[in-house]
Image (spheres, coloured by chain):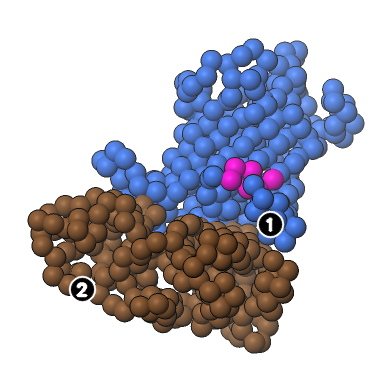
Amino acid sequence: MAVKKDFKRADGRKAEDARPMTAKVGVIPNADGSAMFAFGDTVAIAAVYGPRKLHPQHMQNPTKAVLRCNYDLLSFSVGDRKRPGPNRRAQEISKAIEWALSPVVDLSLFPNTVIDVQIYILQADAGTRTAGINAASMALAQAGIPMTDLVCSIAVGKNDTNLIVDLSKGEEDFEEGEGATDFAVAKPANSSSFSLMQMDGKISPELVPEATKLASKVCEEIYEIQKKTLKDSLLPSEQEKGAKK
Amino acid sequence: MKNEINEAHEAVEDNSTDSSNSSEPVERRPIVPGEVIVSGEDFLPGDGTRRDGENVLANRFGLAEISGRVVKVIPIFGAFIPRKGNVIIGRVADINFSGWMIDIDYASSAFLGIEECPRFINRNEMDQFLAIGDVIAAKIWGVKSKGIDLTLKGKGLGKLEGGFIFRTIPSRVPRVIGREGSMITLVKEKTSCQITVGQNGWIWIKGEKIEDEIKARKAIEFIASQVLVSGLTEKMEEWFENN
């Protein structure tokens, strides 16, 4: 069963297509590293500050740096205005993003410090944590933090029984049949293991390998975009743009 | 006194200067973390790289350089990592009974002990020598887990009076200095300013006229922004003619 080639989605995508992706680095001049990543109408920006001194002191780790992520939806990013400030959902996602990024970041060089990753969602149309992880991994690279790899993240899912990639908000709210399944994964690009797996909804165990295979394929596309964006940011024309800010 | 400071710090920094202006052109290309730079058993992984089986991979975002058998990644972004012997520029943040705390734009604090000053200091009048907010050029003589120890003993170190300081990305300091100080000497000659470049990315400029100082700053910012350009010294000659 699995991926139906002729399955038609509301926005005309094929089952294994992600929404059009755009990326940019250096969007926040004051940060040590920053990036923007968008899946269609979902737009995330990430800023990296540090390594810098960690307060309170008892949180410091004398053997390595602490990676601290903060994810938040901006109040205008969703249909009904979100009350500003952290909430339970944001705290949970922040922690999950931290765990998704930590396998690739080499923290041993900066003992007693903190590396802050701020992720803000400018527009939310489902898949915000995945866009956030993609942006954060580019921002970390641009901040010059030693890393073993870049992290790519994508949501796969199901509408009733059809496997699809990168659900939009409309697809996430699908209620017929088995309903919608949202299965967000993140993986270091050059590795076969995953650093994040979260799921809402239901999926049969036989479908999981298929879903992860589908995710890996899209992750390769994301990786190419991340690579290209980072490298292009060094071209002289881009440099001049940055200097003018 | 005139150029003492400048010459002294370059003598130290040249050891860590990269080969951005070397006569033999070395191929450099942008590389992202985790990307394969070269494969083959012959290559030796240097700074910012690691070996994984056949391949040599990048450990950070920067420019990959293969010189002979050694492969390394030249960082173009990133925080200052203090090493013993680095000359840095800092600002006095606090005075306590045994010395000064110096802000050097790094996560852990830096300390300048009273016994590390080149002349006798009266402990009751320490702010006569260095007051809070004063800018100094100092050398790192120890990096410990608790913090960084600085010294003012050495040629050209001490309080920087007049002029102004600004910051660049610390990873680009070697490029600003150039091979054996060629780049910074060029800027000094063209603008007739005194310039001290700290390894922490802080740069101090003092000139006769404010126009000269601004020109020197613009030149340095231009150098720091040209990451992918080779033969930058020639390009700078051109830049000075146009500006």
Q: Please provide the residue range marked out in magenta.
A: A24-29
Q: Nearer the viewer, mark 1 or mark 2?
A: 2
Closer to the camera in the image, A82 or B202: B202
Closer to the camera in the image, B20 or B180: B180
Q: Colour of chain B?
A: brown
Residue at the image position 42 percent from the left and 51 percent from the top: A51
* Residue type, mark 1 in image: Gln
The image quarter containing residue B76 is: bottom right
Residue with the mark numbered 2: B118
Q: Colour of chain A?
A: blue
Residue at the image position 64 percent from the left and 47 percent from the top: A245
* Residue type, mark 2 in image: Pro
Answer left or right for A86 relative to B229: left
**How far from the left and from the top, in percent, is residue A95?**
47, 34
Please tell me whether residue A6 is drawn above or below residue B86 in the rendered image: above
Answer left or right for A110 relative to A245: left
1 and 2 marks on the same chain: no
Q: In what quadrant of the picture does the N terminus of chain A appear?
A: top right
